[in-house]
Amino acid sequence: MAAAGPIELLAPARDPACGRAAIDSGADAVYIGADRFGARERAGNSLQDIEGLVRYAHRYRARVYVTLNTLLHDGELPQAGELIHRLWELGVDAVIIQDLGLLELDLPPVPLFASTQLDSVTPQKVRFLEQLGFSRVILGRELSLDELRAVRAATCVPLEVFVHGALCVSYSGRCYLSGALGGRSANRGSCAQPCRLPWTLRDGAGVVLAHQRHLLSLQDMDRSAWLAELVDLGVGSLKIEGRLKDERYVRNVVGHYRRALDGVLAARGLPQASSGRVELGFEPDPSRSFHRGGSAYFLRGREAGMSTPHSPKSTGQSLGCVALVDGDWLELDRRHDLQPGDGLCFVGADGAFRGVGVEQVLGGRVRPATMAGLAPGVAVSRNRDRAFERSLEAAGTRRWIALQLRLDAVGGHSSLCAVDEDGVQVFVPLPSGAELARDPARAAAVAEAQLCKLGDTEFRAQAWELAGRAVPHLSRSAWNELRRALVDRLRRARLQAFPRAQAPPRPDRAQAPWARLDYRGNVINAHARALLERCGVAEIEPGAEAGADLSGRPVMTTRYCLRYELERCPRLHTGAAPLEPWSIEDPQGRRLELRFDCARCQMQVLGP
């Protein structure tokens, strides 16, 4: 089932500079946080900055979505509602929310997207959100292709899926580990990421199965090889994670996915979701930005090797193995382009993750700052690439919109006409009473040369036409003024013609797929409770952020399973299984019990 509209490439924006970089590199839409109520509290932006980004994005018919995807207490709902009204007035194209209590407010007709924090992983849940009037549902990262097809077959609402970036080990919206250990709630935007810590794993007899390893830290997602399958099954938006990443990362990753997606769209005769074509000015390669290794993450089903047990840091680009050590120098078994200032990383014989800078390179020989841990056979990666970083900073990335220019040189009512690739057309009259050129061909050549100088704008002249021979004799500066007037008029006309979406009136109820919700329903305000009760939920436990006691209860639920990862799954691996219950212990000595739900093929971490 194909998507209902053009396929969107959606990129993160930590700030307006990252947002513009994403749009310049080919994003069809960006998502950005406001100064409050976003799930990345360190990535907030002022309304003025968001308004500027909206104006820039709409030049290319790209869209801007704002994240208000935290849970809200009763006293915060009016403030959030006011903020949504302001965002709508500024031209924002959609708001991403988690808290269903917002649906009870008097909101403008801004499209609302159901955040992945709403734990949308079943057809029943997605259908419920569709019935509540959401304009899009952002699906959980854990779904396989078959599960995505099942959701698509059961619903009509537009779907968004993640294709790249950092992975939370827990189902989104159902992780309370940070709050349980340190009072910093992920559902309130302040996750401390305890999943990236080193943990010691023990079985029920106290036997250490893994010591001080980053057992819950996952590789990054990379589904660039699976875009065709996602497009074909009917996904409408392909999302890159990374609202804490910098401009270089955004430019590189978006450029890579723009190229990959353009190939898929061209093969199927599908249009791009926004305007313009991109000239990157560099060769994109996600492995040369922050990168923990790549995983399709359950898209093809369960696979081993999803974690990064040695380190949660960037592992970067693989360079091969150490082939030779000679004093302070080494040689690798692959050709490379290392330079002084680059960073190398590797896992030593003791299992420790190490990093070291490159001080000198002579031909294929490399002298690191220290040789500690480097020996023949050790696999080496580059996690800082100075030359690539400089190429990203110096790249003249341009995104341009094709124009057809025509000079109607007929009689005394001559004019300039511009038609862009979206069919927007504007006219600018030529000065009346101007003397006609004695040499029309030469005058037309001067006009063409000056009018097609669009290099400092978002436009590029793809075609030039002269209609008639009554070409006025104008100076180059006069033609330049006419060009500027034409560009200004075209920009205003494009904004007026921008197809801004509005949400239809939202229903006040739907049929909920559950009769009761425990604390994992994340209900912490009276508005959300009233809506869910109206939808048929008879019993609702307050959420963790409302004070629910999580002692001995699941604070993390994940499809990732340590028994499977360590080849101890009783259904797949033979041999004696370690005694239950397993537990993990962090560097501060806090012990958490693990529970394995083999019927659902899930692992749970229980609260202390």
Image (cartoon, grey):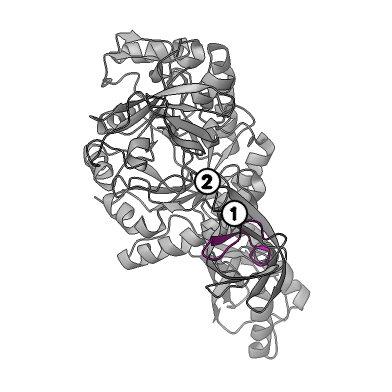
Where is residue 88? Give x, y as percent: 55, 33
- The kind of secondary structure element at disc 1 is helix
Label 2: how many Cα within 10 Å (few below 14, some 14–19, many 20+)? some
If you read the primary sequence from the N terminus, does the residue marked by circle 1 or circle 2 appear first? 1
Q: Residue at x 29, y 21 (%)?
A: 510
**Could you tell me which residue is drawn at 64 percent across and 34 percent down?**
42
Instruction: Determine whether, in the image, residue 209 is placed left or right of residue 497.
Output: left
Side (left or right) of 111 relative to 156: right
**Residue lying at 62% horizontally and 51% vertically, measured from the top left:** 354
Which-is-in-front pick, marks 1 and 2?
2
Per the image, is 380 magenta? yes
Read off the residue under disc 2. Answer: 310
Quadrant hosting residue 78:
top right
> What's under tag 1, amino acid-wise?
Tyr
Q: Which residues are magenta?
A: 371-388
Instruction: State the residue position of label 1.
Output: 249
Marker count (numbered): 2
Task: Return the residue nearer the eye: 250 or 113.
Answer: 250
Q: Relative to 234, is 172 above or below?
A: above
